[in-house]
């Protein structure tokens, strides 16, 4: 295995992330999965939006695209459709992906476009200092939920599954080995793949909710989750309130860019000897 | 292959111009009165190995176009007022990150949903200042169907050459009006080609002459492994919060347009040399205005016409020149006086500027302009 740091733009380190932040752990798991699969660095495009998690791509030595807030998947859709041979990976956060970018998320899943999306879910808007997000649990605190969150959280994995993603999994920054393994599988799936990586924000989420620092938050995450396989053997009351981790969904469905190219080649065969008389085709025929 | 002669509508001509320029990628969202462009692209692009995608909204459309452009593909989207508003944030992204993309805005009456099937020219200022922050931009305004073809083609030339988003501002009437268009022999087209680096060794994605230089753009997926960010960035593409870096970048982007203004400025002029009253207009308003000017000349009145084709950057010199002979400048436009503001700025009191705004969804009639013109003498 190559050194993990070989995949980083070392001159851009250290990162902007706070001490105890889980985003580095998730980024490390992604890099190890890429290395294990032996993917070509020159063939990977990493796309992100706005937020703490989205800063990850700037430290990585690939073609990297740090876009506007919520739009990573839409930019990635353009990259992937333009050059389907590229491996396109989106790194996003709970606010970026599930609030402002929610529409692109469900439509990419519906299309089953071959993009691997890693959602770093720390239940809070960290970059803007701790407002509640679409994944902040009900009743918990944020700077814009000073009396406890009145809203209820999205289950991002259920959302992805319902919208048509063909690989959906969840792990955490505590269960790093599992996370790495699931990202590896997601990268191998030909279709829209989602890995939700639950991660800790000690600076805002942990402090505001008086859970503590990174260690206490990691324990909080550990205690709140249960492996989907273990859960299957338990009676419902023992699973109550626990978040499932592991591979949650896998299905087979035609991938969007492959289907588009198939259509294109059929059209081109039909119009192979097309020489004008209608619209613009002739302009590009020679 | 000889020249191609066709009867077509403006939206069709825009699409033809884009295809002639080598359009490879279109992402869009249905909106009246621009939808024919998306429909044609969905039909034509697969034939030439290009890609069409109907995105979930206009925000996604411009984003997908920028993503595709980063892989080296010539990309375009088309929309109208409401969709153009939604695209603004990422137009700013393309401007700061210097990513070529062409946006056609077939203008309709606004604000809001407004009158979707009626023409307007109310997005002139939005085309210039729609996205937040100072930024580099080019906008072209065809005055007839033939120019829809020519200026869309040109939009790609400029966008690829200067690495800047280029907006083509048409309107519902030009978009749907049918005229005869003579297109030159396709083999004679000078297809826009993006300047690219030759080797990844030592590549700095934003290295360029600080005085308006255009950096070489490496396509994604070719081993350059560069970082594209909407944060202010240095020549290596690294995000930077340094005042000097931000200032240098914004200065270079501004100079990129300003320095090359002579090449960018484009207009149609008639009877200006000795005119006492000049009419300055653009797009479909200029059609009625030109008829009025010709009628005035036929009656011995010294009227002249300046129809602006490159609306941004604004042709300051050409407008200032008018004041050498003209005491009055009339500006007919289908808005409440957006271009007139620019004309006032440029002439700076050296001529009287008459705002002739029309905002009811109706086109100007030549006699409406003629009446105002006659009174000005």
Image (tube, coloured by chain):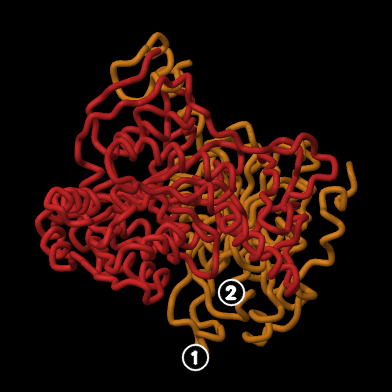
Chain colours: A orange, B red
Q: Residue at x 74, y 38 (%)?
A: B197
Identify which residue is drawn at 39% across, 34% down: B17
Q: Mark 1 sits on what residue?
A: A147
Residue B114 picture quarter:
bottom left
Outermost residue toward the top?
A: A273
- Disc 1 crowd rating (10 Å Cα; few below 14, some 14-19, many 20+) is few
Tell me where residue B99 appears, x and y as whole percent.
Answer: 58, 49
Q: Chain of mark 2?
A: A
- Percent position of residue A46, x then y: 67, 49
Question: Which dot, 2 or 1, sits closer to the camera?
Answer: 2
Tell me if label 2 and label 1 are in contact, CB under 8 Å: no
Taking A191 as reference, is B16 left or right? left
Circle 2 sits in a helix, a strand or a loop, which is it? Answer: strand
Disc 2: CA contacts within 10 A as few (<14), some (14-19) or many (>=20): many
How far apart marks 2 and 1 lie (CA) works out to 17 Å
Disc ID at residue A125: 2
When the figure is inspected, residue B4 is found, relative to residue B239, above or below; the finding is: above
SS at mark 1 in the image: loop
**Residue plotted at (72% across, 35% down):** B222
* Up/down of A267 relative to B239, above or below: above
Q: Quadrant of the C terminus of chain B?
A: bottom left
Q: Nearer the viewer, residue B200 or A121?
A: B200
- Percent x, y of residue B192: 54, 34
From where the camera sits, is residue A245 visible?
Answer: no
Report if residue A15 is visible in the image.
Answer: yes
Q: Is residue B334 left or right of residue A206?
A: left
Residue at image coords 74%, 78%:
A216
Q: Is residue B155 left or right of residue B350?
A: right
Which of B232/B352 is in front? B352
In primary-sequence order, the first of circles 2 and 1 is 2
Q: Taking B127 as reference, is B262 left or right? A: right
**Which quadrant of the structure image shows residue B322?**
bottom left
């Amino acid at each position: 295995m190559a050194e993990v740091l070989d995949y980083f733009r070392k001159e851009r380190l250290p990162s902007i992330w706070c001490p105890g932040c889980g985003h580095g752990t998730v980024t490390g798991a992604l890099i190890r999965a890429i290395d294990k699969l032996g993917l070509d660095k020159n063939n990977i495009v990493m796309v992100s939006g706005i937020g703490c998690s989205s800063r990850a791509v700037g430290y990585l030595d690939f073609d990297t695209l740090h876009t506007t807030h919520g739009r990573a998947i839409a930019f990635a859709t353009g990259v992937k459709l333009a050059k389907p041979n590229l491996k396109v990976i989106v790194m996003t956060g709970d606010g970026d992906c599930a609030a402002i970018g929610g529409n692109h998320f469900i439509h990419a899943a519906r299309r089953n476009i071959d993009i691997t999306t890693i959602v770093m879910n720390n239940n809070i808007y960290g970059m803007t200092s701790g407002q509640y997000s679409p994944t902040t649990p009900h009743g918990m605190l944020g700077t814009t939920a000073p009396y406890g969150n009145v809203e209820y959280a999205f289950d991002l994995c259920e959302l992805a599954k319902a919208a048509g993603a063909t690989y959906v999994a969840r792990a955490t920054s505590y269960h790093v080995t599992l996370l790495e393994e699931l990202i590896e599988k997601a990268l191998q799936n030909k279709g829209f793949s989602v890995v939700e990586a639950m991660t800790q924000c000690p600076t805002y989420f942990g402090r505001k909710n008086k859970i503590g620092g990174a260690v206490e938050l990691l324990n909080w995450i550990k205690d709140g989750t249960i492996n989907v396989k273990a859960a299957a053997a338990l009676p419902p009351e023992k699973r109550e309130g626990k978040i499932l981790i592991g591979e949650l969904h896998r299905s087979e469905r035609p991938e969007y860019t492959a289907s588009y190219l198939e259509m294109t080649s059929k059209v081109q065969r039909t119009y192979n000897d097309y020489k004008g008389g209608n619209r613009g085709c002739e302009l590009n025929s020679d | 292959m000889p020249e191609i002669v066709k009867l077509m509508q403006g939206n069709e001509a825009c699409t033809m111009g884009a295809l002639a320029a080598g359009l490879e990628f279109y992402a869009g969202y249905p909106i009246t009165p621009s939808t024919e462009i998306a429909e044609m692209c969905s039909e034509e692009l697969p034939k030439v190995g290009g890609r069409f995608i109907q995105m979930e909204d206009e925000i996604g459309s411009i984003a997908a176009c920028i993503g595709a452009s980063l892989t080296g593909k010539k990309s375009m989207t088309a929309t109208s007022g409401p969709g153009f508003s939604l695209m603004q944030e990422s137009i700013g992204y393309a401007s700061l990150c210097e990513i070529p993309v062409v946006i056609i805005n077939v203008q309709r009456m606004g604000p809001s949903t407004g009158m979707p099937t009626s023409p307007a020219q109310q997005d002139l200022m939005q085309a210039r200042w729609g996205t937040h922050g100072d930024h580099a931009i080019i906008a072209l305004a065809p005055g007839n169907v033939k120019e829809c073809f020519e200026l869309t083609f040109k939009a790609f030339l400029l966008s690829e050459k200067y690495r800047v988003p280029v907006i083509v501002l048409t309107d519902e009437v030009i978009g749907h009006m049918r005229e005869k268009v003579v297109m030159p022999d396709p083999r004679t087209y000078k297809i826009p080609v993006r300047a690219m680096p030759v080797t990844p060794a030592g590549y700095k994605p934003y290295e360029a002459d600080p005085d308006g230089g255009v950096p070489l753009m490496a396509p994604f997926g070719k081993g350059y492994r560069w970082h594209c960010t909407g944060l202010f960035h240095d020549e290596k593409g690294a995000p930077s919060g340094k005042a000097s870096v931000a200032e240098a970048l914004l200065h270079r982007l501004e100079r990129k347009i300003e320095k090359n203004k002579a090449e960018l400025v484009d207009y149609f002029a008639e009877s200006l040399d000795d005119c006492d009253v000049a009419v300055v207009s653009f797009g479909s308003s200029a059609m009625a205005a030109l008829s009025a000017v010709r009628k005035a000349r036929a009656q011995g009145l010294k009227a002249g016409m300046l129809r602006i084709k490159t609306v941004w950057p604004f042709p300051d010199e050409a407008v200032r020149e008018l004041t050498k002979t003209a005491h009055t400048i009339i500006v007919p436009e289908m808005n409440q006086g957006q271009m007139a503001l620019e004309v006032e700025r440029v002439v700076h009191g050296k001529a009287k500027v008459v705002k002739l705004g029309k905002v009811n969804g109706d086109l100007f009639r030549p006699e409406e302009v003629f009446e105002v013109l006659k009174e000005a003498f």
